[in-house]
Amino acid sequence: MNRHVIIPDAPLPRGVKDFLPNKAAKIEYLKQSLKDVFHRWAFRPIIPPSLEYLEVLERGLGEGLRDRTFRFDDRQNGKLVAFSPDITPQVARIVATRMKNAPLPIRLCYNGKVLRHTEQQAGKDREIIQAGVELIGLQGPEADAEMIAMAIECLQSLGATEFTVDIGQVEFFHGIMDDLNLPGPQALAVQQAIARKDSSGLADLLSELSLEDHKYAEIMALPRLFGGREVLERAAQIVANDRSRRALENLRQILAVLETYGVEEHVTFDLGELRGLGYHTGVTFQGFLTGMGSAVCSGGRYDSLTERYGMPAPATGFAFNLLNLLTSLDRDLERTVVQSIDALILQNGPDKRSAQRLARTLRSQGYACARDIIERSLQDSLDYGRKMHFRYVMVVEDPTDNVRLIRLADNAEQMISLQAVLAGELRL
Amino acid sequence: MSDYITFALPKGRIMQDSMELFARIGITCPEMNGDSRKLVFENPDTKFRFMAVRATDVPTYVEYGCADLGVVGKDTLLEQGKDLYEPLDLKFGFCRMVVAEPGVLLRDEDPASWSNIRVATKYPNITERYFAERGVQVELIKLYGSIELAPLVGLAERIVDLVSTGATMRENGLVEVETIAEITSRLIINRASLKTKHQRITRIIQDLERVLAEDVAND
């Protein structure tokens, strides 16, 4: 066969990928592992649609994602429809409209693909695979601690060893900003400087305002309030306002629950973390793996989201980005995931019935096996088997009806009778 | 691998300034002193690694987590707008981002009356944002070097570029009309590194902050 043919012109749009069996197996493994954890915490799967009316979807999207939604015309009625860029608003809509009579709390999980426009740069994903959970109808810190403990358990179940779940609290920031009464653009500039931890830029901005000393100290502390649990004590010494102090108390209560779950060593705090400000109403968190530049999971409390769909309810949740997980765990997953297939079965001569019977028997025993079907030399079949990650090649020998069993790892051979295999006596 | 702290530094002057500053807080790399074409230097005793890269690539290495920290000019950060932490102004690499034009032009017209102008620059994003805020439409011409040439040969009437002393501009008959930003070198940090290696990185930030404060006090 001539393999040097011209590559057909069939390109993909930027930011989407084909996943071939090796990568696909890893993604499936990630999905399944997360789903198992979700199940152990009593979360039940739901499947939202990939298309929604833009106008409905937008109600639940933060500013950042609204601009990044793929949208187009629905020919059936001329309305604008959109591919969802995030599953959380969809879950909020489903709960508020279709499950409003269900007893609270509601624990739901999902996995699926979302689409997001990205800045024009080659290689950034526009299609993202998410798996996450939403816990609706619970207000207290234990519910938020449940989310964080679950995220940690997810990372552990995937075999991650060096990771941190970094916890923030948007109410802490709001408490500090509350009585400043900055005009919009200035408030945004202050917020952006804090998000970049840009102390000198922040100092420049604040020098234009004449702030009281304690207020100045509170704001200037924000870019540096990150680290271990000692951050909470440091923060308590700096802030005086009630709203920020309540936020700190909330974090202390969450930490206490995490201690009971035995996962507190995996958490860090960052009170200057302002990502997701438009959407979250309390605690926020993001999971980071060593060596991976961006977060692998993010979540937090969003008490005003289901209300936008007609059912006020407190809620908290998180989602993993499976492609980020794949990037950082790729090599570790190689060992756990690459699925070897048990046997490649061939038979010489025109009569293939023994091979077919053999394949049927092995499959019924739970083994994964394939018939070679192509007529070729044994050597070619062995090469094929190795390339395609088979563990064994089985040759049914005519007319003796013996089976030659070749282990591809070391070419060790043995002979067994077909009858014995059909009687279920072979263990691969 | 991950017990190392990796810096991405721009080749040349800023790299020297950075290493001099780092030496004052005990971060050194003897391997770098040898005459070498290497791009990566290590100090295995203190677990620091240094990569020499192009200035404009520093934010990219840090954003993707190949380096935990980096040193880069605020001009590059403003232009690229990447999602990074920039906790410290290192107070070296001083210069200004300015709008400049031929002296003749300045005599004839008032910058306040600009409505539609053509600008050559290495910094299209900064330029576009700056003029958009002023309500001026610009036609941008992206160049990769010798920006001062553009007004001389009529490629654009004006330029946006960095100046430190202003000598090159003066020699080419250009005058600064507006300052867009004061530029210095910044310490930048990868988001995940700050979280997962917060003890060592916090230490670096605090030590540098202390040394920089001493400099201010001595000025």
Image (cartoon, coloured by chain):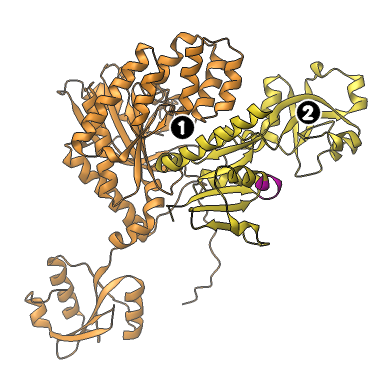
Q: Position of residue A418 (x, y in %)?
A: 12, 82
Q: Give the chain coloured orange.
A: A
Residue A248 image position (x, y, % from top left) = 32, 21
Chain that is yellow in the image: B
Please name the residue that numbered disc 2 is placed on: B99
Q: Quadrant of residue A113?
A: top left
Q: Height in image: A398 above or below A276?
A: below
Q: Are marks 2 and 1 in contact (CB under 8 Å)?
A: no
- x%, y% of residue B101? 85, 29
On screen, residue A139 above or below A297: above
Within-10-Å neighbours for mark 1: few <14, some 14–19, many 20+: many
Number of on-image labels: 2
Q: Image quarter for residue A151?
A: top left
Residue B99: image x %, image y %? 78, 28
> Which segment did they paint magenta?
B11-16
Residue A192 seen by the camera? yes
Which residue is disc 1 drawn over? Answer: A69
